[in-house]
Amino acid sequence: MNFDQKGLRKRSITVAYFFEKIQERFDIKFRRVNSVDEQKRRISERDLHRPGLAIAGFTKLFTYKRVQILGNTETRYLNHLSLEQRWSAFTEFVKFRMPCIILTSNNKLDQELIDMATRAGIPVFATRCSSTKAIYLITDFLDEEFSLYQQYHGSMVDVYGVGVLLSGKSGLGKSEVALDLIERGHGLVADDVVVVKRRGETNVLVASRNNIIDHFMEIRGLGVVDVRQNFGIRAIRDSKEVQVVVELLEWSKESEYERLGLDQKMVKLLGVDLPLVQLPIFPGKNITAIIEVVALNFLLKHYAGYVPAEALTERIRNVINKERADVPAPSTSSEEYDDEND
């Protein structure tokens, strides 16, 4: 696994893709107000815009490349204009090549204005959602679509609620370990190809599966396994935050491995530092049980601030200090000196 790979971003999405996917993800319904080729319009920015000033005639700072939201304020402003002023204002508005217009709160435009948008090739949608809710959901959708992302070779599992990314060279048994964790009641997010996204400017990394591979696994010597069919819906997760990276390594006598765990190794994924645990592989080693303990140790440290290695070190230090305190100090009194000389 190359931890130093640079992340990628989508440059744009079509309005057709936006219209289809956002309704699949959220409980928000859009209806088409006009009929245009939505494949020809693309969204390239995650931010939205409410074009009140642009409709009023001030277009010097008009961010027209964003999705345009027309709520109560914008539609009521248009409706208070005379018919001639309304047509004039909207004619200037649709001259800009914007991705699409969304009418919120079930607002409507005059058919003449809809026809202007249609002639300009601008898709117009309407929703019953308020502007606040629509902006929140659309921004969340676009934020994820345009997030920094990278595909990694490995397996992603949910172990006791902790997102564990398994990495390592091909043939070391990542899929077998993931399958064993599933059999023990944990959840599979992805196998072989793990898509990791960074949420906006936060330090949160979210892993999901490749839609083509879905929840199928390839086990050497066995073949393809359908995790969902074999283990049920409880054995899979659609996505999970990446919290720990476990790297499987080939055992080598010449290599030195962590014994106490006092020095926490870190790895950088998409610019975010994550705890790294490196586990050497050799026959008879129960990697599955160790990964479960890795997850439990993470929970202890994260929620209780307890680190077993530090607790053991402190206990040893206390024992040493107590033994030193119990040893009497050598006497140097004049009486003892005289006794020794007699």
Image: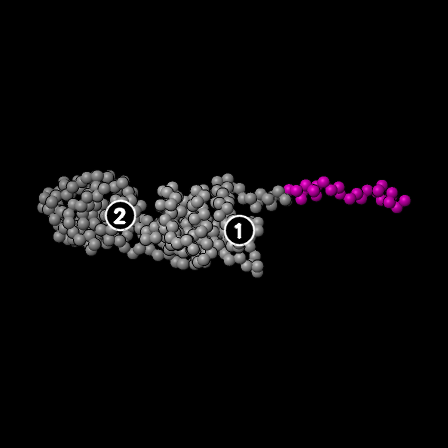
Using the rendered image of the protein, determine whether residue 266 is visible from the camera's viewpoint.
no
Q: Which residue is mark 2?
A: 21
Instruction: Check residue 147 for magenta coloring.
Output: no
Q: Residue at x 33, y 55 (%)?
A: 9
- Give the farthest residue toward the right: 342
Q: Horizontal and vertical percent for residue 143? A: 32, 49
Task: Please say if 278 is above or below 30.
Answer: below
- Residue range in magenta is 318-342
Task: Determine if the magenta segment contains residue 319.
Answer: yes
Give x and y (percent) for residue 133. Answer: 27, 40
Picture coordinates of residue 194, whole percent (x, y): 38, 52
Q: How is the image coloured?
A: one colour
**Which of the labelled discs sits on residue 171, or is there none?**
none
Tell me the quarter of the image containing the C terminus. top right
Give the number of the disc on residue 285: 1
Amino acid carrying mark 1 in the image? Lys
Q: Amino acid at mark 2?
A: Lys
Q: Residue at x 45, y 47 (%)?
A: 180
Q: Residue furthest left?
A: 84
In the image, is 257 to the left or to the right of 203?
right
Name the residue rendered at 16%, 51% in the picture: 36
